Amino acid sequence: MNKIQFHNTLSSQVEEFTPISSNNIKMYVCGITPYDRCHLGHARCYVVFDTIRRYFEYSGYNVEYVQNFTDIDDKIINRSKELNIGYKELAEKFIDDFFENCKKINIKPASEYPRVSQHIPEILATITRLVEKGYAYAVEGDVYYSVKKFEGYGKLSKRNTDDLLVGARIAPGEKKRDPLDFALWKASKPEEPSWDSPWGKGRPGWHIECSAMSLHEIGTETLDIHGGGQDLIFPHHENEIAQSEAATGKPFANYWIHNGFVTINKEKMSKSLGNFFALSDIFAKYAPPVVRLFLISQHYRTPLDFSDNKLEQAKNGWERITRAKEIAENLIPSAPEGGLTQFHKNLADEYVKKFTESMNNDFNTSEALAALHGLVNQLYSFETDRSSDINKSAIKYSLSKLTEICGVLGFILPSRQAANDEIMSLVQQRLDARKNKDFAKADEIRKKIDSLGYVVEDTPSGPRVRQVNVK
């Protein structure tokens, strides 16, 4: 097993990871509230945790990965009224959008996707337990959590209750005893979805759902890892800790991981601010692997500022990675036979070592990508290196390590189609036109080749044609 270290939000320190049970990891990541299209901020979160999950699995761990859907919520209710459709229909529409985008960007499916609406009994049981233990109280159909009853409140966000009380207030219509208390169960309003409960018809508050669902789906009272976006640290994850630990008397999660925001001009991207870019719109301009490469180009805890320029850089990077694979595949058939030399094996292995060292150090994908590009450069060098030890074995080994690292980072290297007879005929026609100094005709033929999805590159050994825009 690799010794993996990462930043634990709970301790504010980088710690070496130790699972609760041997090589098994129980991991819960907060999912979306499906009331609108998925945007780039969502993508960063779930690409980050997909990459972390993949690296754990690459390192020999078995990962049970659970991610929920908040399919009943004020935002969903309000949006369904705006669009004049049922809340279930609305949620289903955007859950489908989520899955469609995850498939495009190659995010592995979770082990389970629990939904709030399907776990009302577990939620009610958790609330009842909190009421019976004195951590929660009912008032006219609502149930609130009493924050001051939980001594450890604020340990995740590093806030204290005295500071939180400054400016805190009880909103009109709320019946809680203290401004810091939060709703576990909300009495239903007319024409809102509701469920029966010991306190009357109502629906869950936001925070209780993850406590109940994670404990139910994971099947243990303590998680190895709980994750989500940085914006969830307070109040959502802080409240989850308070609820869960009050109910069980045990730590809710041993490690907490939070990814940084995607920003636009240094301001957080979000639906509420109206500055978000839907993934479907971005995919219309950039291939999903390009977007994924952009999303892991910075360390997961740092802000990632969105710009077309940075996506163009990612596009160029992805083209270079896929081109390295193409170079290798083109060289292998004509390369000499021979055994793998220690020099070329050590060189490729060194890049893999740098990759694992980077990922072991707080999942530093920025440095890991540098190791990946080292392998890319090695494959590029084979094209011009005429050394006798550049044989099939050396090329295949380096290509296998490139494919291995790409897989851990969630990239599937595309297979390009060889140019067909029509393309090759056009290439020859262009070559003839250039020889006859008919450059206008040569340029016209080049544009036609481009329109068919191929590009001609002029090299000292003659024209080379390759397929482009492979996703």
Image (cartoon, grey):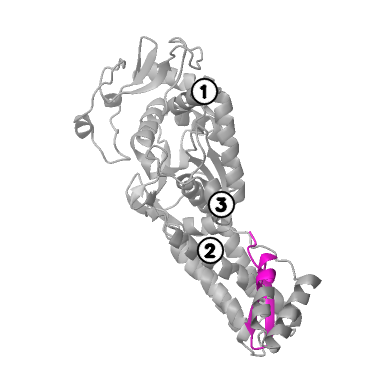
Q: Position of residue 124 (x, y in %)?
A: 48, 19
Residue at x-position 34% and y-position 53%: 265
Residue at x-position 52% and y-position 71%: 373
User: Viewed as shown, does residue 366 lie left or right of 315?
Assistant: left
Q: Which residue is mark 2?
A: 315
Query: Is residue 460 covered in magenta?
Result: yes
Determine the secondary structure under disc 3.
helix
Which is more N-terminal, label 1 or label 3? 1
**What's drawn in magenta, residue-wise?**
446-471
Which residue type does callout 3 highlight?
Phe
Q: Position of residue 151 (x, y in %)?
A: 28, 30
Q: CA distance from mark 3 to mark 1?
A: 38 Å
Q: Residues within 10 Å of mark 2 (few under 14, many from 20)?
A: many
Q: CA distance from mark 2 to mark 1?
A: 46 Å
Q: Which residue is mark 3?
A: 283
Q: Would residue 112 be visible to someone looking at this image?
A: no
Q: Position of residue 180 (x, y in %)?
A: 27, 26
Q: Position of residue 388 (x, y in %)?
A: 67, 90
User: Viewed as shown, does residue 203 lie left or right of 106?
Assistant: left
User: Viewed as shown, does residue 113 lie left or right of 308?
Assistant: right
Labelled pair 2, 3 in contact (Cβ < 8 Å): no
